[in-house]
Amino acid sequence: VTKRLRGEKAQSIYHLRVGLGGGKSHTCILIYYLIKHHGKVASIIEERIGKKEKIKVDVPENTKAAIIDGLRINPILGFRFPDGTRVNTLWGLLFKQLGVYEKLREIDTWETAPTTDILRDVLKSPTLILIDELTSYVENVRYSPLKAGKVQVFLQALTTAIRESRNCALIITTPAGVYEEAYKLISELLGRYAKPLIVATGEESRRIRKRALFMDEFDTIRAVSYTHLTL
């Protein structure tokens, strides 16, 4: 991921599909903090595996990061930011975090979805987008042909824009074993760009859950870094 953000040749889209508690959200946390708190997290990673594996974790200073959490935004009520801004859609949530919401507010509606050109224009600087619990959100809209269709259009446009932007990366997580009907609505689309990755084995998942419960924020990042940095 960091290679991609630096503009080097690397995979641009990752799809993490594991059982509940398997570490997908921890992976998102790790990579998010790698961007937002690079100095602290990079030193932890380099201490644990950097020298051994010769992994470079530098990211450009102007890198942006956005999180779309399918459990946080309601398809009907949307999501309200601390500054009072209420967004209605997944793409509205993305635009707000990337600082372009006022410019694109008019397309934060279920009547339309952003085109690839619009998204590509938004992604001019190094950008990491994390979409967690996607199937949970799709499960809530799949009985509405309008909303389900617009989510599919958005994902199609976003994945295309990411691939065509040389320093942007996208990580999508979907839990295995739940919301399978919702998963069917997006699996073919996601499969065009990235095969599902197994983030952790059963034993690794148990260790991750234990550490997530009993360690603080940065200790948790340290604990999961060895398992997940190969992304």
Image: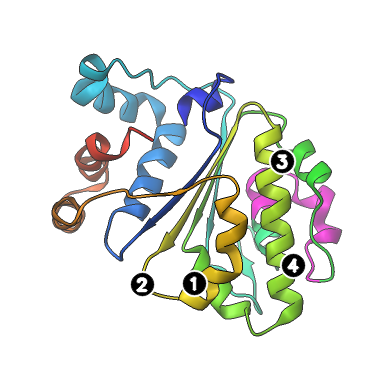
| Of the image marks 4 and 1, the number of the one nearer the N terminus | 1
Give the quadrant of the C terminus: top left
Mark 2–mark 3 Cα distance, whole angstroms, equals 29 Å
| Of the image marks 3 and 4, the number of the one nearer the N terminus | 4
Which residue position is annotated with label 1? 136
Mark 3–mark 4 Cα distance, whole angstroms, equals 16 Å
Which residue position is annotated with label 4? 150
- Which portion, as a residue range, is magenta? 94-110
Within 10 Å of disc 3 (Cα), the crowding (few <14, some 14-19, many 20+) is: many
Mark 4–mark 1 Cα distance, whole angstroms, equals 16 Å
Above or below 219: residue 131? below
Residue 88 % position (x, y): 70, 68
Single out the mark in the foreground, 4 or 2: 2
Which residue position is annotated with label 3? 161
Q: Residue at x 39, y 75 (%)?
A: 178
Can residue 137 be seen in this snapshot? no
Within 10 Å of disc 2 (Cα), the crowding (few <14, some 14-19, many 20+) is: few
Give the quarter of the image for residue 137. Answer: bottom right
In the image, is 186 to the left or to the right of 115? Answer: left
Which residue position is annotated with label 2? 177
**Which amino acid does the dot numbered 1 rest on?**
Ser
**Which amino acid does the dot numbered 4 rest on?**
Lys
Residue 194 % position (x, y): 52, 45
Determine if the magenta segment contains residue 98.
yes
Residue nearest the observer in this picture, 221 or 143: 143
| Of the image marks 1 and 2, the number of the one nearer the N terminus | 1
